[in-house]
Amino acid sequence: MPGRQETGEAQATALEREGGLELVLAGVWQITAPRPSWTQVLGDRKPARVRPQVDEVGKWDTSLLLFLFEVQEWCRRTGATWDSAALPERIAVLLQQFVKAHEKSEPHDRSDSFLTSVGRTTIDTWVRARSASTFLGESVIGLVKLLRAPRRFRWRDCLHEMQLCGAMALPIVSLISFLVGLIMAYQAAVQLRQFGADIYVADLVGLSVVREMGPLMAAIILAGRTGAAFAATLANMKANDEVDALESLGISPVQFLVLPRLIALAVMMPLLALYSNGVGILGGMAVAAGVLEIPPSAYWIETQSIVDLSDVNSGLLKSVAFGVLIGLSGCLRGLQAERSAAGVGQAATSAVVTGILLIIVADALFAVVFNILGW
Amino acid sequence: MSETGFPAPGSVPGFGGQANWRPNFAEPAIEVAGLSAGYGGEVVLRDVSFTVGRSEIFFIIGGSGCGKSTLLRNLVGLNVPMSGTVSFLGRPFSQADAASRRAMLKTFGMLFQSGALWSSLSLRENVALPLEEYTTLSRREINEIATLKLGQVGLAGFEDYFPAEISGGMKKRAGLARALALDPEIVFFDEPSAGLDPVTSRKLDELILQIRDNFGTTIVVVSHELASIFALADRVIMLDRTEQGIIATGTPHDLARNSPDPRVVEFLRRSDGHKRS
């Protein structure tokens, strides 16, 4: 009788015996290697009894159990007798576990009917809206408390946030604002040159940068940079129970975590917008000097003649609102996040999307209101 | 200081053993009546009632997923109970208005499983924050108290370290120092031994015992660490997932020996501590 085969592929041979098949298994059965197919081994035969025999099997793992389970299931389906008497006890026990696990396994259906989905979405929307309004209310209450007792406010945290969202954002705001001013000047130059109105590039760039593009570009940069950072930080704090630790001490997370960030953004945003205006005008000036041969002094005089203080103020007013919106959306998404690594990522993404959406909506509203007010 | 960094019993100011309190387990520190709790409409605990005596070390035990942490979160107000009431020292907590709740919150401290230190603050600032919120002490006094509390848990010299710069066991001790900052009457511990090596875990147990013995603090611990349960608990309640509530109440040794419920016996007898006792 041949002994164990410690090398070689997994083999299964069906030998016809009186009353059924003797299934002789041999070789090395490993899950990472190919294994024989029971339907091929069986061929057209329809035995009344199958008796597996594993004496010639060398190393084996789940691959062997999988094959035996397949044969056993075939026997159960066709009514053939499964004779496991020749199987070693260890394999029989593991095979039994395999069968039990298979019997207990139930696919968890997560699909919902249409009505259930609508219901869930409605409840979810309601919960989110309620949590957003609670958050907004707590922020206002926190602000009132701050005005009443400014000494209790965490000014050091606020200054730290100002440095992070303001000073540290200068390089990226510089680059983007300069390039936007440059692009706008190029686009204007192509058209205006045809009419000999090159100098009006300064008017176009100056007005659009100061009233619109400067605050908007700074806001979008901060939504991506600071809004996401706020959300990720707060979501991570929530996942690490740091927010719960505050609540367990009766300290409001809004007061402690949100307000310093909100105020930092509301203060730094107009400063960044102002800076962005200046750099954007410089971008336009660079194109005017390099391409249109307009001296920088002439460009600056033309800009001064068209941009007045009300233009600058309207841009700054918008930028304060943008700063508050970015801060609110970043902090809200962070505090709403699920307590997991995925939750942190989702909170950051959601904060950026919400922030940019709110900025654009607010900008449109400002355009309408300013138009009505004649600003 | 011992080799593991913990102070030797009685060697730290504030742990000097001037025990002017008397145990009185009959006087309730915490009363929970008919509490049901869960998440998103799904009930985890149904109609749970129990009382914790003053200065008692009370363990909430049970297998994973039985609702221990849920119960703790409802006790300290991090979750709102679906129904039922929680009272501390005779005053209702779960239905109290915001001002009363805030007043009560400063009478208890909580040590979270992970320590939950505020990562942007140094250890000293972590301990100082509750004092800044609730007292009118000067900055110098607050710093002195923070240094003392950190010393009490064996972290003298680590005051200016940030949470990211210290080990898991040290984080827990710093969390404990923060929980003790306002000298609370009740301290809650969520899985204090989780993730700690056996020696550090035992030392933390000793520290818990010292806090109770020196100050008469009521201590509620959520744990399934059998060694800690047998070493510390005056009384335990055992929760069960299928029952959605308490299946046993008593001292751990009593329950291990005499409980008629096989689930309780099976849970508690897997302990070396019990075999030795």
Image (cartoon, rainbow, N blue to C red):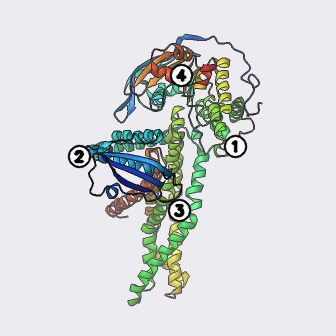
Near mark 3 (Cα within 10 A), the count class, few <14, some 14-19 or many ≥20, is many
Q: CA distance from mark 3 to mark 2?
A: 49 Å
Q: Which residue is mark 4?
A: B268
Same-chain check, marks 3 and 1? no
Q: Earlier in the sequence, mark 3 or mark 2?
A: 2
Residue A166 seen:
yes
The residue under label 1 is which amino acid type?
Answer: Tyr
Determine whether label 3 and label 2 are within 8 Å by CB.
no
- Hey, what amino acid is under mark 4? Leu
Residue corresponding to mark 3? A272
Q: Chain of mark 3?
A: A
Distance CA(mark 2)–CA(mark 1): 54 Å
Badge 2 and badge 1 both on one subunit = no
Q: Chain of mark 1?
A: B
Q: Nearer the viewer, mark 3 or mark 2?
A: 2
Neighbor class of circle 1 (other Cα within 10 Å; few <14, some 14-19, many 20+) is some
Query: Label for residue A311?
Result: none
Q: Is residue A258 above or below residue A30?
A: above
Which chain is disc 2 placed on?
Answer: A
Query: In the picture provided, is A338 more to the left or to the right than B109?
Result: left
Secondary structure at badge 3 equals helix
Label 3 – label 1 distance at C-alpha: 34 Å
> For residue A113, which numbered disc appears in the image?
2
What residue lies at 69% left-to-right and 43% top-to-bottom? B161
The answer to whether the residue labelled 4 contacts the one labelled 1, judged by CB atoms less than 8 Å apart, is: no
User: Image quadrant of residue A11?
Assistant: bottom left
Asked whether residue A29 is in view, the answer is no
